[in-house]
């Protein structure tokens, strides 16, 4: 007999607390079209925060330290996904994941296979900022995510369905590519209605190359966000 929702949710949460996940949550993805695993409609959103000192350095744009941090966190997220998936399959549930999102290097395809921020908003972890990044109260956008999909009967969170950016336009002012329109996100908006992926891609490709990355990277908007600054203040860096 499978565990009750309360039991498996509690056991999984306890397991995740022993991993390096800095933030996590569970979301109902049944209303999301084109799921990578159509029979697995619950998303476990897992995040690892960026090193605060490296985040601070992003005010001047990306360097080789950020490139290494970016690649390292992707590898750690992959391992974290395997760990959590393994825990659930050992419990008798189905679980699967896709490779944590890496930078897309094709200007004709500027959408990820599955946006991990979709799972994160469903899990109540944050909202989509004007920069099109997932904004958390704990780390701002200075956190990267992965998603584990499962049929385990987890107790899911209330989704975040509104922006908390308000009148702030720090990312718009800081964006050297001019990709941020300043319009607030809502679930009804398409990404291109408030953020220009093409402009971001072209600038990030050039900056990434200068920083020694094979992929487009920038991160200036990460450092500019006031929610990131709160994170850096807690770390004693501001």
Image: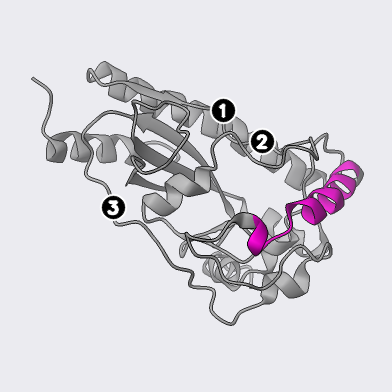
Left or right: 141 in relation to 205: left
- Quarter of the image with the N terminus is top left
Give me the disc on residue 22.
none
- Tell which of 12 and 94 is nearer to you: 94
In the rendered image, the vertical position of residue 136 relative to residue 202, given as above or below: below
Q: Where does residue 237 sit, x and y in percent of width and height?
A: 63, 68
Q: Residue furthest left?
A: 1
Disc 1 target residue: 99
Which comes sooner in the sequence, label 1 or label 3?
A: 1
The CA span between labels 2 and 3 is 26 Å
Give the quadrant of residue 11.
top left
Determine the residue positioned at 57% across, 33% down: 100
Q: Main secondary structure of the magenta part?
A: helix
In the rendered image, the vertical position of residue 12 relative to residue 205, given as above or below: above
Give me the disc on residue 102.
2
- Magenta span of residues: 192-209
Q: SS at mark 1?
A: loop
Q: Is residue 22 visible?
A: no
Q: SS at mark 3?
A: loop
Q: Is residue 129 visible?
A: yes
Determine the residue positioned at 53% across, 34% down: 77
Q: Where does residue 32 sit, x and y in percent of width and height?
A: 41, 42
Q: SS at mark 2?
A: loop
In the rendered image, the vertical position of residue 170 relative to residue 78, given as above or below: below
Label 2 close to label 1 by CB (< 8 Å): yes
Left or right: 20 in relation to 202: left
Left or right: 65 in relation to 193: right
Disc 1 crowd rating (10 Å Cα; few below 14, some 14-19, many 20+) is some
Give me the disc on residue 157.
3
**Is 6 colored magenta in this rendering?**
no
- Quarter of the image with the C terminus is bottom right
**Is 195 colored magenta in this rendering?**
yes
């Amino acid at each position: 007999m499978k565990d009750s929702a309360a039991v498996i949710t509690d056991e999984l949460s306890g397991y995740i607390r022993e991993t390096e996940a800095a933030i996590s949550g569970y979301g109902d993805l049944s209303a999301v079209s084109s799921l990578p695993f159509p029979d697995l409609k619950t998303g476990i959103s897992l995040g690892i925060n960026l090193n605060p000192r490296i985040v601070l350095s992003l005010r001047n744009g990306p360097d080789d330290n950020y490139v290494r941090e970016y690649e390292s966190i992707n590898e750690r997220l992959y391992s974290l996904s395997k760990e959590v998936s393994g825990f659930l399959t050992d419990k008798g549930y189905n679980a699967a994941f896709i490779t944590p999102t890496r930078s897309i290097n094709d200007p004709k395809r500027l959408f990820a296979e599955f946006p991990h921020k979709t799972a994160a908003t469903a899990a109540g972890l944050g909202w989509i900022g004007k920069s099109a990044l997932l904004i958390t109260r704990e780390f701002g956008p200075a956190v990267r995510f992965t998603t584990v999909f499962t049929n385990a009967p987890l107790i899911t969170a209330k989704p975040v369905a509104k922006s908390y950016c308000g009148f702030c336009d720090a990312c718009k002012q800081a964006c050297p590519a001019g990709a941020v329109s300043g319009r607030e996100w809502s679930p009804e908006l398409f990404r291109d209605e408030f953020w220009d992926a093409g402009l971001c891609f072209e600038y990030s490709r050039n900056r990434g190359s200068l920083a020694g990355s094979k992929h487009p990277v920038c991160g200036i908007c990460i450092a500019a966000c006031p929610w990131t600054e709160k994170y850096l203040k807690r770390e004693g860096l501001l």
